[in-house]
Image (cartoon, helix red, strand yellow):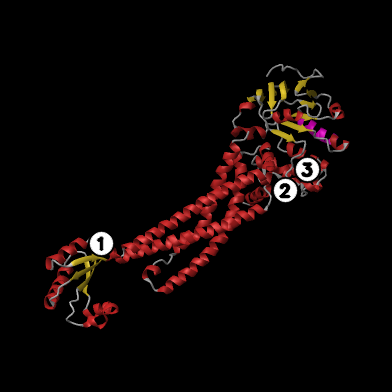
Amino acid sequence: MGNIVHFENVGLRYGTGPETLSDVSFTLATGGFYFLTGASGAGKTSLLKLLYLAQRPTRGAVRLFGEDAGSLPRARLPGFRRRIGVVFQDFRLLPQLSAYDNVALPLRVAGVRESEIEAPVMEMLAWVGLSARVTAKPPTLSGGEQQRIAIARAVIARPEILVADEPTGNVDPDMADRLLHLFEALNRLGTTIVVATHDLHLIGRIPHAQLMRVEKGKLVDPSGLLRHPPGGA
Amino acid sequence: MNGFRHRAAIDLRLLGEGQRGWVMAGIMGIMLFLTVLAGALGLGVARSAIGLDRQLAGQLTVQLVEPDAGLRDVRAKALVAAVAKVPGVTRVREADRAELAALLKPWLGDVGLDPELPMPVLIDVTATEGSTAQVSAAARRVAPQARVDSSARWLSPVRGLLGALGLVAIGLVLVIAAATAGVALLVARAGLDTHRDTIDVLHMLGSTDLQVARLLQRRIARDTLLGGAIGTLAALALVALFQTKLALTGSEVLGGATLAPVDWTLLLLLPIGFALLATVATRLTVLHTLGRKL
C-alpha cells in the first residue's frame, strides 16, 4: 500500500503571527483510517487545512498524491481538491441552495451531466436519512441535519481522501454510528479517512484506525501506531 | 438543452438574488439609453454627410461677369456649348434672368428685373467627379474672366460640422462603453466580496477560477441585457420621434439624417454588444483577482 500524504517538517504561520504548526512530519497510507485529536486551538483545523489545500505551508514539504502540494500552480489546485472530500466544522452549506443542490454541488463542479446526478444524490440523501428534506434549505434544517448534508456533500464524488472536522459533533449517538459506518464503508472502498474529533468513544469504535495527536502545534504519537518521524514517502 | 438551462438556473441561484442586480440593470439601462442616442446621432450624421457628398459631387457653377449685355449673351451661349463638350459633363443649363432676379429679390427688390442691371451669367453644370479642371479650362478658353465654383467648396463648413458631430458621437459611444466596462469591473469586485463564502466553498469543492468567473459573468450579462434592453427601447422610441420631426422639416440635409433599416438593426444590437463587453470585463476582473489568492 502506497502513501497518499506525506508531511515533512511542515510549519504554518498566519501572517506575521507565531507558528500555528511547527515541524509536523507524518505519512498517511492510501486507504488508511486516521483520527486526529487534540485540545481546542492545538492546531487540528490548521493541519486539516493543509490537507485539503486551503492553506500552503510556510515551510517544509507537503506531498499529496505523490506531488509537492506546496508548489502546485493555482491552475492545478481544482483537480487536486476534487480528489479530497471535506466536512467542515461549520458545515459551510450554501444557504440559498436546497439540500439536494448542496449535495449535488461537487458533481456539478466536476462537470457530471445533470441526468447522471439525481440517482447518486438521492441515494446519498437516503443514506444520511434526509430523503424527506430534499428541497429544504439549510437555514430550515437542524444542526444535525445540516451536518449530515455536509457529510453527504463531502462523500458524493467518491474522494480519495475524506477530511472531516468534528463530523459527529451535532448528531445523536445513533446517527454518529451511522455516519461512522458510512466512513468505514468508504474506507473499505479505498478512501483514506482523516477525522478530527474530541470524541474518544468515536475513536474506540474503529479499532484499526490510527491516532494522531496535536499539541501546541506539534504532532505527538501517543499510540505508537503512526510512525513518527515518517517511515518513508 | 434542458440540462443546460437547469444548470444555468442553478448557477444563478448559487449567488442568490440581491438588490445589486437591479442596481446594475438600472445603471446599464441608463448607459444603453445614452449610447443608443449617441449612436443614432452618429449614424444619422453619417447618413446626412453621405447624402450631402452624393448630392454635391460634380455640381459646378460657371459664373461670367460681363457688363456688355450683347457680348454677355454671346459668351454665355459659347460657354454652354464649350462646357457641354467636356467629357464627363452630363448636364449644362444657364439660369435664366427671371430665376436670378427671383434669387436677388430679397436684397434688390424689383431692380433685379431691370434689363440695364449688369447681372452675371450663372451656368449650372453637373459633371462626374474629377472633371472640374477640364470644365474650368474649357470655360476660360471661351471667356478668360469666367469663374468655376464647386458647390462642395461652398458647403465644406457644413460638411466639416457633420464630420465633427460624427466624431463626437463616436467618442461618446466609446466613453460610455469604457464606463460600462468600469461598472462591470466594480460590480464583479463587489460580487467577489459579497459572495466570498460561497466562492470559498466552491473552490474547496474543486471549482476552477473560470467556473467562478462564469457565475458572475452570467449574472452581470443578464443584468446588462435586461437593463440594456429597456434603455435601448426607450432611446429608440425617442429616436423614432426625432426622425418623424426631421422628416417634417423638409430640409435636404436634415432629411438625409433619416436612419436606414441597417442603422436600426445596429442600434438594436448595442445591448448585446454591451453585455459581451461587460462579460469580458467581469471575466478578466474575476480571473485577475482570484489569481492573486492561494
Camera-side mark, 3 or 2: 2
Quarter of the view holding residue B170: bottom left
Chain part drawn in magenta: A177-189
Mark 3: secondary structure: helix
Q: Count residues near mark 3 (Cα–Cα under 10 Å), then give few for <14, some for 14-19, many for 20+.
A: many
Q: Nearest the camera: A21 or A79?
A: A21
Q: Specify the amino acid type for callout 2.
A: Gln
Give the chain of mark 2: A
Q: Name the residue carrying label 2.
A: A96
Q: Position of residue B2 (x, y in %)?
A: 64, 52
Q: Name the residue carrying label 3.
A: A125
Q: Are marks 1 and 3 on the same chain?
A: no
Mark 2: secondary structure: loop
Q: Count residues near mark 1 (Cα–Cα under 10 Å), then give few for <14, some for 14-19, many for 20+.
A: few
Quarter of the view holding residue B230: bottom right
B119 with respect to A49 (left or right): left
Q: Position of residue A87 (x, y in %)?
A: 75, 35
Q: Position of residue A124 (x, y in %)?
A: 77, 41
Q: Name the residue carrying label 1.
A: B129
Q: Are marks 2 and 1 on the same chain?
A: no
Q: Nearest the camera: B122 or B47?
A: B122
Q: Is residue B279 above or below residue A31?
A: below
Mark 3 and mark 2 residues within 8 Å of each other at the beta carbon: no
B204 with respect to B179 (left or right): right
Q: How many marks?
A: 3
Asked whether the viewer can see residue B276, the reply is no
Q: Specify the amino acid type for callout 1.
A: Glu
Question: Residue placed at 77% from the left, 33% from the top?
Answer: A165
Q: Specify the amino acid type for callout 3.
A: Leu
